[in-house]
Amino acid sequence: MDKDKILPVTDARKELYSLVKSCKSRSLSFVLTSDGEAVARLLSEDEYESLIETLEILSDRDQVKRLAKAIEHIKKEKLYTHEDVFGHPQDK
């Protein structure tokens, strides 16, 4: 994450409410340090859920194979319209 801000835990404690708001509204995340060493991260619930979902997908070998096949189709411009797949145009 290139949006990470690094700050000591003691500073984070003083600014916790504003840090939480920044996570949610500006999609920022924070690396919290103690004695100069990263010890924790503060990130939005949406970002956390996204990471967990990505891990779940990547841990499913069949899903990864399907994704790789889909990427190959895209690279070869072997694409299908909604109508090709479902037999009718997509509702708008």
Image (cartoon, helix red, strand yellow):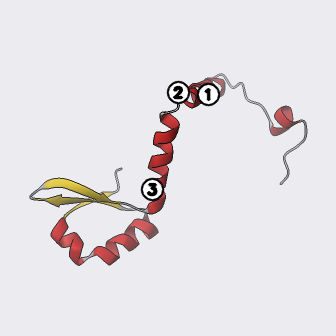
Residue under circle 1?
Answer: 66
* Structural distance between the alpha carbons of marks 3 and 2: 23 Å
Contact check, label 3 and label 2, Cβ < 8 Å: no
- Quarter of the image that includes the C terminus: bottom right
Q: Is tag 3's residue or tag 2's residue first in the polypeptide sequence?
A: 3
Residue shown at 47%/34% (left/top)? 59
Q: Three-letter amino acid code at disc 2? A: Arg
Query: How many C-alpha atoms fall within 10 Å of the one at disc 3: few (<14), some, or many (≥20)?
Result: some
Q: Does dot 3 land on a helix, a strand or a loop?
A: helix
Query: How many C-alpha atoms fall within 10 Å of the one at disc 2: few (<14), some, or many (≥20)?
Result: few
* Structural distance between the alpha carbons of marks 1 and 3: 24 Å
Q: Nearer the viewer, residue 40 or 5?
A: 40
Residue 5 is situated, as x and y percent measured from the top left of the image, at: 27, 60
| Label at residue 61 | 2
Residue under circle 3?
Answer: 47
Q: Say whether residue 77 is left or right of residue 60.
A: right
Residue 73 is situated, as x and y percent measured from the top left of the image, at: 66, 24
Q: Is residue 46 above or below residue 64?
A: below
Residue shown at 11%/56% (left/top)? 36
